[in-house]
Image (cartoon, rainbow, N blue to C red):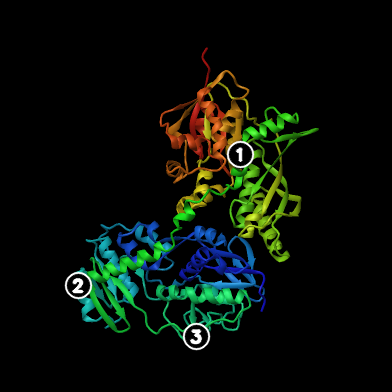
Amino acid sequence: MTTGGTLLLAGGGHSHALLLKRWAMQPERRPPQSITLVNRCSTALYSGMVPGLIAGLYQRDELALDLRQLCDRAGVAFVEAEITGLNPEQNLLHLRDRPALHFNWLSLDVGAVSRPSAAGVPIKPLEASLSFLESEDPSDPNPLRVIGAGAAGLEVVLALRRRWPKRELKLQQRRGQLDLAVQRVLQKANIEVTDDDNHHNGPSLLCTGSQGPAWLATTGLPLAPDGRVRTDRHLRVEGHPCLFASGDCAVISASPRPASGVWAVRAGRPLAINLEAACKGQPLRPWHPQRKALQLIGSHEDAAWARWGGWRLGPSRLLWHLKQRIDRAFMNGFLQPAAMADSAPMACRGCAAKLPAQSLAASLERVGLGGQPEDAAHLAGQPGLLQSVDGFPALVSDPWLNGRLTALHACSDLWACGAPVSSAMATITLPMVSADEQQELLVQTLAGIRSVLDEQCAELIGGHTMESRSTSPLPASLGVQITLTVNGNSPQSPWLKTGLRPGDALLISRPLGTGVLFAGAMSGATKAADLDTALQTMACSQHTLLEQIEPIRGGIHACTDITGFGLLGHLGEMLQNSPGLTVELEGSAIPAYPGALELFERGISSTLAPSNRAAWRWLEGPVQLRDHESPALLELLVDPQTCGPLLLACTSKAATQLTRNGPWLQIGNTTAAHD
């Protein structure tokens, strides 16, 4: 067996979450390999609290495991992507809309899905069924039917009763499935029990059992009849010594257990021990799971009952409090220790790694390169050709996404000039890791860059690669640094930063706050949903805005993109050659990403923010901030942006058209300064 290479963790189930927690708390146990977790979402819901979420007892944040943060703490790269297949012969994990990932070791914890049926909405995947329940009207006269009277169906229908005290509910069982004691609980909750599986007029929720994801059937791996991967007692896939599997997607052939969060949690430690041993070439330990597990099932009231095989106790309020205590203790175990959260802030990445404006200006002045810089420059002798260069240290540990974000950020300089991108060249510095790992990082990075250029029908025409001479970070993908030279053709005169006129409207194309969100993420302060929202917007190309603007191009007087120096710093650059103008900013109109202002209020900011605060001097001169002035807003004005918005000045007529038909928001206007 090989002991080098890459370990892929496919799926963010409970076993893998506990694995990450172990390595975060005890980093000496972490295998020396490069490790990456792949999951379709940045969070995973703890199944034990899902009924409470359905009942309305918990908020989603209370049971969401932040996988991205866990990975950061454990020194593991995180890739948010949907898994579509696996080729065990070529050691490739296939992903939707991006290149496959190569591995030397693979651990599967991809969960399960409800067995297919035309009868209703499947309870798994949970994200889809929870969205379905959110869309349901509690006053709908049509009854909602839960199909399946096992433990899952019972918990769900009783949780729905708590969620909707008045709505008609039905539970469909197999004839004779439920004993009298359970039927009495359901009768007390005013839930009709039926064994009629004929057509049902109202909505249905399917809780009739689960199976492995459909794509597992195409892998050639040994599967049980329910589509789950067969493993030995070491949690190693039968016949595949470098593949492991646990949780709801797997079953130990010698000790079959039902798909359940209980077994997924219990598999966490033996999986960790065996993965650590396998990656170090050490003997594996067999796992002998107990035959039965205690199940605590909540009722529609503050009570629960316990099951141990055929034995049952309750419903009881004491059991309900015990269940809540166990569930909250499980989630609290994933909280970042206070010592880590309160430690000195790490240097920010992305465009927040930019040299401070004052140092940059002083350096350029000393070598005779001072003056008013533009976002892109004309190439000598070719007035229609524009060129710009940009780049930064890796912002995220996913090399494909990092390549995409860096390319979008670099292209923004040309978009700010009104020029579409035609080509680019890349300089990529890779960390000092094995040649195979460097190759994988380069493949993923280039594919991410290409994803941006392909959308614009632009070409990657060349580049250069280097190996860093600095110590490789953990994960190594954070050691990738990209610099892009982008070229574009401007058939008309490009927009400049300067050119503001009295009466211009100031428009912005997307929210602010990426700097503080990523700064907060390093200490665990940023909510996973807030970072997801920002990344989703950042990863969207703004090249389509040029098509929208083209018909009213003559109404655009100046434009720039907001990057490392923040809104106020770049607005100051626009004003440097306009001594007779005043800008009035509407504070309440300036958009912020969800969670950004809250982080500022908690005293969190990017490491570039202190130097950017020098731009506050503009508020004492030509920039007036009207209404809504607050410390948080002042910080937002100087927050460094990666893949930030475009900021343009245009006529009021152009502003009306842009704000009506696109993402643009007006945040202020210019006036002639009074003597």
Element class at badge 1: helix
Would you call the spot at circle 3 few (<14 residues within 10 Å), some (14-19), or many (20 or more)?
some
In the rendered image, residue 621, in percent from the top left (x then y), is placed at 53, 22
Among the two numbered marks 1 and 3 on one chain, the one whose residue lies closer to the N terminus: 3
Residue at 46% x, 72% y is 112
Residue 398 vertical position relative to residue 116 in the rendered view, above or below: above
Among the two numbered marks 1 and 2 on one chain, the one whose residue lies closer to the N terminus: 2
Q: Is residue 411 visible?
A: yes
- Res. 94 image quadrant: bottom right
In-front residue for pair 52/177: 52
- Res. 617 image quadrant: top right
Badge nearest the viewer, 1 or 3: 3
Q: What residue type is disc 3 on? A: Ser
Query: Which residue in the structure is indicated by mark 1?
Result: 546
The N terminus: image quadrant: bottom right
Residue furthest top as drawn: 675
Dots 1 and 3: beta carbons under 8 Å? no
Query: Which residue in the structure is indicated by mark 3?
Result: 253
In-front residue for pair 416/580: 580
Element class at badge 3: loop
- 340 horizontally vs 381: left or right: left
- Res. 383 image quadrant: top right
Element class at badge 2: helix
Q: Is residue 556 visible?
A: no
